Image (cartoon, helix red, strand yellow):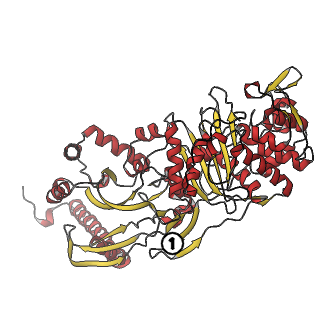
């Protein structure tokens, strides 16, 4: 039934008015919110969004700087750079759809002669090591693959071809342990102060001089900013900013390529683990330093999976270990130089004092004897060094076993302490002492305290002594130069691209030790006779070498191993310029392996060959 307006209920009219009022209020509030939001976007945040809009029109590229070259002392390039095309995947730009992502990765696997499983494993392992960096699937990509990817870019989102600098090693494995390698910076390294300013994906030195001198070799990255269109393609004349990269400085090493190559060849020819050092006795410049087995540093220019990394570092032959500076060995008779210095400087021995060598020395219930039981009769120091009489030095060890004189002088000469070399990982070694062993005994770590037998063993480089060729070279150099304990180093100078010297490296000596002229003269004479005297232990090797030298053989016993061969030599005699120390694991007597290796090194240094075999020597094996 229809009602006139005057007949309607007042309640119905009031409800309608209320609804209209509520609707109008909500509309006003929504309009106010919308107005406030628009006002904020336009007024408060306008500058920010304008900047972001402009950024959407630009792309910024970081340009990696080429690392500086590494050269030997004569300018021979040991490490350079080459450019390589790298196929990289930016995982953030891959399709979000899992099926589409799998399809794209399968295509990439086929193009790179791989399979989907291997590609995914590579991505997983590289992202684990450097989460924010693009994943490099392949370096040295061929031109045809580059053209194909460029023509089919829409089928491969996230795939990029980048020009990258790769370390190049024109001399192969030569000096691999000294040079080290480079690799992507890790998350932990990014937090270190010395790497401030670097980004994920940047490469840094990981070992050797690449690590020590990384700050100089690295250079400064450049920057390129370009303008792009709505599709992300560069616009004509769209380059906005270009800041060229600054190449790293070149590092010239003190290494002499001929000496380095000769030393490595000498070790490799014997096929046994070992190490060598050749050093200037006055400046501490390393002319050659190496280890066998070695490795190919170019291996680290290619992406490695975690398994490859583990296999490399866990190799039982330890090819990455530089035995010249990290090896820990007893030295055998080459340590007799230290014992002789300690005995002469402490007054226990004089150059003319005679000690009777009857072939053995019995202390309590223990007997110490010469190799082969040979007897040399009454000996003074010079002849004892020439024939390498163990009994002579056993006697000195017995007389000094509790005085600490051997340890005091060994420590002065650099045994069992940091060498100061500018290479990472050098070992301090172990110089056994009465306090050290007694402390272990008190803590229940050994079954006996220090005894006279320990002193006797130490006097001939045996027992618990642990050192390496570098420390022995430092000790011999100190005698050769009259008492200066040098700081060994391989870095010589920095140069710019034009070859101008920017900085020279010449670390100060570690300390001066007072060695009496008579001490130096007597020991050097004994070492000269040991190398080139008719009864010398290495006369068969150096007897006819045209340069006068002073050297000492060593045969060290190692538990669980065959005898270790040692040789340390100063040349020329009597005013040495260089020292060479060689050790070869399980190489037998010092004259069998280490001395011939040292001869090859000296022939390279002096550019002179031995005049022929000198015949068998008449002394102890050393």
Residue located at (52% from left, 65% from top):
252
Q: Residue furthest top?
A: 365
- Residue 149: name its quadrant: bottom left
Image quarter (top left, top right, bottom left or bottom right) of the N terminus: bottom left
Residue located at (33% from left, 68% from top):
61
The reply, left or right, for residue 393 in relation to residue 333 is right
Q: Give the labeled residue for mark 1.
A: 495
Of 71 and 105, nearer the camera is 71
Q: Residue furthest left?
A: 1
Instruction: Give x and y (percent) for residue 402.
Output: 90, 37
Of 536 and 207, nearer the camera is 536
Instruction: Give x and y (percent) for residue 388.
Output: 76, 37
Q: Does the image show residue 292?
A: no
Image quarter (top left, top right, bottom left or bottom right) of the C terminus: top right
The reply, left or right, for residue 173 in relation to residue 215 is left
Instruction: Give x and y (percent) for residue 211.
Output: 53, 57
| Number of other residues with Cα within 10 Å of mark 1, as a class: few under 14, some 14 to 19, many 20 or more | some
- Residue 284: name its quadrant: bottom right
Residue located at (50% from left, 55% from top):
179
Residue located at (55% from left, 45% from top):
291
Q: Does the image show residue 472?
A: yes
Question: Which element is circle 1 on?
Answer: strand
């Amino acid at each position: 039934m229809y009602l006139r307006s005057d007949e309607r209920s007042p309640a119905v009219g009031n409800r309608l008015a209320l609804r209209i009022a509520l609707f109008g209020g909500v509309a006003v509030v929504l309009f106010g919110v919308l107005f406030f939001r628009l006002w904020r976007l336009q007024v408060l945040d306008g500058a920010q969004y304008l900047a972001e809009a402009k950024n959407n029109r630009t792309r910024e590229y970081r340009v990696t700087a080429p690392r500086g070259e590494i050269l030997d002392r004569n300018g021979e390039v040991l490490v350079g750079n080459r450019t390589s095309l790298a196929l990289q995947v930016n995982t953030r730009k891959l399709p979000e759809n899992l099926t589409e992502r799998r399809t794209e990765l399968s295509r990439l696997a086929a193009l790179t002669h791989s399979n989907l499983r291997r590609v995914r494993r590579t991505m997983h392992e590289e992202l684990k090591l450097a989460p924010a960096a693009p994943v490099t699937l392949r370096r040295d990509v061929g031109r045809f693959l580059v053209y194909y990817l460029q023509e089919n870019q829409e089928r491969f989102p996230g795939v990029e071809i980048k020009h990258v600098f790769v370390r190049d090693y024109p001399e192969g494995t030569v000096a691999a342990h000294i040079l080290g390698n480079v690799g992507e910076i890790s998350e932990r390294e990014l937090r270190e102060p010395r790497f401030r300013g670097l980004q994920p994906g940047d490469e840094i030195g990981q070992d050797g001089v690449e690590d020590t001198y990384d700050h100089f070799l690295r250079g400064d990255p450049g920057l390129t900013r370009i303008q792009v269109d709505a599709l992300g393609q560069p616009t004509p004349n769209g380059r906005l900013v270009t800041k060229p990269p600054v190449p790293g400085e070149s590092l010239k090493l003190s290494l002499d390529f001929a000496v380095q190559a000769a030393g490595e060849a000498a070790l490799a020819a014997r096929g046994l683990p070992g190490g060598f050092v050749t050093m200037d006795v006055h400046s501490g410049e390393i002319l050659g330093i190496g280890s066998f087995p070695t490795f190919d540093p170019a291996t680290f220019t290619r992406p490695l999976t975690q398994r490859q990394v583990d296999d490399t570092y866990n190799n039982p032959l330890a090819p990455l270990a530089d035995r010249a500076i990290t090896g820990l060995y007893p030295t055998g008779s080459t340590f007799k130089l230290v014992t002789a210095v300690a005995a002469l400087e402490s007054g226990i021995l004089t150059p003319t004092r005679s000690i009777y060598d009857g072939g053995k020395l019995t202390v309590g219930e223990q007997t110490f004897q010469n190799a082969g039981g040979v007897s040399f009769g009454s000996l003074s120091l010079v002849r004892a060094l020439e024939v390498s009489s163990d009994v002579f030095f056993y006697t000195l060890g017995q007389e000094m076993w509790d005085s600490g004189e051997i340890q005091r002088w060994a420590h002065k000469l650099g045994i069992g302490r940091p060498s100061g070399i500018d290479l990472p990982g050098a070992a301090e070694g172990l110089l056994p002492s009465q306090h050290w062993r007694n402390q272990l005994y008190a803590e229940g770590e050994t079954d006996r305290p220090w005894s006279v037998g320990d002193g006797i063993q130490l006097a001939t480089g045996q027992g618990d002594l642990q050192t390496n060729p570098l420390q022995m070279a430092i000790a011999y150099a100190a005698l050769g130069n009259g008492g200066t304990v040098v700081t060994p180093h391989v870095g010589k100078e920095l140069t710019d691209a034009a070859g101008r010297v920017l900085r020279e490296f010449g670390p100060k000596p570690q300390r001066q030790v007072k060695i009496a002229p008579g001490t130096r003269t007597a020991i050097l004479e004994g070492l000269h006779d040991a190398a080139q005297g008719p009864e010398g232990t290495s006369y068969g090797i150096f007897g006819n070498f045209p340069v006068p030298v002073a050297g000492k053989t060593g045969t060290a016993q190692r538990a669980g191993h065959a005898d270790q061969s040692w040789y340390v030599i100063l040349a020329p005699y009597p005013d040495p310029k260089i020292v060479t120390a060689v050790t070869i694991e399980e190489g037998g007597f010092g004259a069998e392996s280490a001395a011939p290796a040292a001869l090859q090194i000296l022939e390279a240094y002096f550019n002179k060959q031995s005049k022929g075999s000198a015949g068998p020597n008449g002394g102890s094996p050393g």
